[in-house]
Image: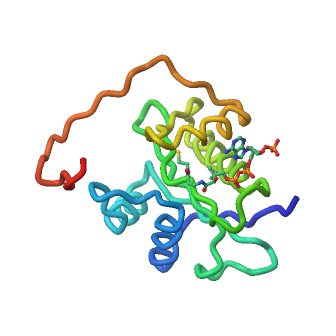
Amino acid sequence: MTSLIIREASKQDRDAVIALWRACDLTRPWNDPDNDFGFALDKPSSHILIAFSPESGCDPTHAIGTIMVGHDGHRGWFYYLAVTPDQQGQGFGKQLLRAAEEWLLAKGIWKAHLMVRTGNEKVIRFYEDLGYNVSETQVMERWIDPSKRGDNA
Ligand SMILES: CC(C)(COP(=O)(O)OP(=O)(O)OC[C@H]1O[C@@H](n2cnc3c(N)ncnc32)[C@H](O)[C@@H]1OP(=O)(O)O)[C@@H](O)C(=O)NCCC(=O)NCCS
């Protein structure tokens, strides 16, 4: 299996990362991807990891995948795990998830959570294969600032 080069994203990666998220159908009207990208990079408790194959080098236009990782001071969270559609099924998603776990461990966080949208349940088997369980916890939500709510939220 190809071992990916995985590094923290920089501002120069923004357009390529957002294009990848769109190609993987991860963007939604209520999550401005441009804002999400900048917000994660600006904070010490979060980052975006970006993956490249060793052959293509680390130019953002050759990005193979991403994962957003962060913690809230207690638990770790993952968002925007994406592998470009024509490169899926080669173990790259697994490498990105493991790299994000290492990122959390280095910050002293030993438990991670993620959310799977209704309609994307097929991805649950991928996470289960990598040791994740469907939690019995219910996630609740509220728009504290309703002006940020998109049309379909
Ligand atoms: C989810 C995603 C990141 C997985 O990436 P990937 O590179 O295709 O996955 P991998 O090749 O690393 O798979 C790792 C393991 O999970 C298994 N797996 C992957 N997708 C699976 C699926 N849909 N169902 C069951 N098992 C799956 C693989 O067989 C592999 O097992 P192995 O290591 O024993 O061979 C990719 O499919 C993707 O980008 N999907 C669209 C975006 C998305 O839904 N992201 C998740 C949001 S919660």
Q: In the rendered view, would you say 77 is above or below 52?
A: above
The residue furthest front is 119
Name the residue located 47 percent from the left edge and 42 percent from the top edge: 119
Measured from the top left, where is residue 111 in percent x and y? 57, 29
Measured from the top left, where is residue 16 in percent x and y? 52, 76
Quarter of the image with the N terminus is bottom right
User: Quadrant location of residue 101?
Assistant: top right
Name the residue located 63 percent from the left edge and 82 percent from the top edge: 59
Front one among 6 and 61:
61
Q: In the rendered view, would you say 136 is above or below 77?
A: above
The chosen color scheme is rainbow
Question: How many discs appear?
Answer: 0
Q: In the rendered view, would you say 35 is above or below 132?
A: below
Name the residue located 40 percent from the left edge and 60 percent from the top edge: 27
Name the residue located 45 percent from the left edge and 70 percent from the top edge: 18
In the displayed structure image, the side of residue 76 where residue 105 appears, left or right: right
Measured from the top left, where is residue 94 in percent x and y? 72, 48
The residue furthest top is 136
User: Quadrant location of residue 65?
Assistant: bottom right
In the displayed structure image, the side of residue 113 where residue 89 appears, left or right: right
Measured from the top left, where is residue 78 in percent x and y? 51, 45
Q: In the rendered view, would you say 102 is above or below 141?
A: below
User: Quadrant location of residue 92?
Assistant: bottom right
Front one among 98 and 130:
130
